[in-house]
Amino acid sequence: MERKRAGIPESVKKLYSTDATVIDSGKIYIPEKVYFPVTEDEVVSIIRSAYRKKVPLYFRGGGTGMTGGCIVSKPKAWVISSEKLIKIIDLNLTDEYVDVESGVIPDELNSYLNQYNYFYPPAPASSGFSTIGGNISENSNGLNVFKYGTTGDWVREIRFITGTGEKMKLGGKFRKSVAGYSLKDLIIGSEGTLGFIYSAKLSIMKIPEAVSGFMIFFDSSLEGIRFVKYILEIGLKPSIFEYIDNYSIKSVINYTNFEVPQNTKSAVILKFEGLITEVKYIEIFIKEFLSNFELCGHLNTSSSDGFKEIMEFRKAISPALFSIERGKVNEDLVIPISLLEDYFKFIKTLERKYKMKIAVFGHIGFGNLHTNIMFDPGKKDQVKTIQMLLDELFMFVIDNGGSISGEHGIGITKKAYLKKEVGNVTYNIFKDIKKIFDPRGIINPGKMF
């Protein structure tokens, strides 16, 4: 039996028509129906009904996406929300995995795991309100990405329902397998264009016994980049490796009571964790070579609670940027480490040309930088200018061997650039694969392709 919320008013349905996307993503329609299944069979029934009736179908997790991934772009569409799929199905400490439904929120999962001295590392910055299913669909990565990798690196099995309503189990309880094509990895990062993720088995690990965290303040952006390259060259592997630019630092100072040294123009956050002896050695080593850089100062902590205070600064950046302008477009671009200086010089060129501030922060170890175009929504000339600025920014990244998305996905807003990054042949293969899983094209029609 299909389960739907009877008599949902239009004002509530409207909430399920969009996500956190800021820039114009075209016409948005209020869905005809919104479903909140609580079992796998209910999802199957809804999808099969939509397939028979050729109804456009959109899947939705926490609605935290910023590229129009779950925006309803067709009339008379149905939405399937995973918000009721919140069961932790199984925990296996011997094989070190947890089996969860797709609507489970990462922070709530980690609260559950912490009582067993385990954790799930790749939770993204939105881990307090995004969902596991959404994280898998986007192959999200969080602040721990440099050491622990992306969501996909921790997915062992996916229970999945295709666009025709067929159930699939991809992967398994095992840690390693080369039996056949890895269809599981095809689903990871597919942004909900191939079907609905009902549940997943995720690898987990024991909480490290020791922690050492640093927040290091530099007197220029280039000095911060020089430090980043040094960390990479000597082969250190911090679990958290973040860069923060001048705009971001100033916005957090205005937004919170956090104090930073005078003349700070950039900052780098490092977190090391592991065995006590290993972490202590790294801590001493870093303190010794800091004298080789032009610093304004640094913070160091050897406790988890102390590092939480540093992370409060990092997590405050996104909301704090609104103290600079009332609007922002956050792009998750990836730049080769060797070209970081060129990228920051290009950002300054764009600022001068378009007379708009651009704040940059993020996962510097992988060159995955959140590039925020700050604007005033009340100024129509700025709103029109944003797309021209983005065109130049995306093409610079593509032409220099980078990627237009490191974690947010393509959605509606970046699909015009996907073909330019991957090429015509690859792009056409993507479309052919989608037809296999979704022969009538009812799932997220228009998204990515």
Image (cartoon, rainbow, N blue to C red):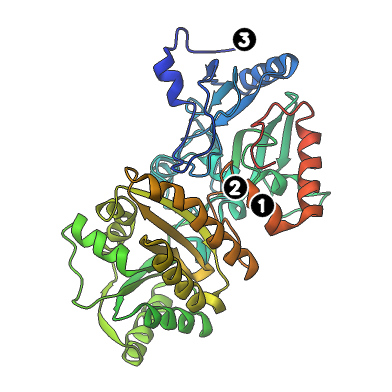
**Residue linked to disc 1:** 418
**Residue linked to disc 2:** 410
Viewer-nearest residue: 411 or 153: 411
Q: Secondary structure at mark 2?
A: loop
Amino acid beneath label 2:
Ile
Q: How far across and down, in percent of the image, does residue 362 sit?
A: 43, 63
Q: Which mark is residue 342?
A: none
**Residue linked to disc 3:** 1
Q: Are marks 2 and 1 in contact (CB under 8 Å)?
A: yes
Mark 2 neighbour class, 10 Å CA radius: few under 14, some 14 to 19, many 20 or more: many
Q: Quadrant of residue 207?
A: bottom left
The alpha-carbon separation of the residues under discs 1 and 3 comes to: 39 Å
The alpha-carbon separation of the residues under discs 2 and 3 comes to: 34 Å
> In the picture provided, is 290 more to the left or to the right than 30?
left
Residue furthest front in the image:
381
Amino acid beneath label 1:
Leu
Residue furthest bottom in the image:
292
Q: How far across and down, in percent of the image, does residue 99 sit?
A: 57, 39
Residue furthest right in the image:
180
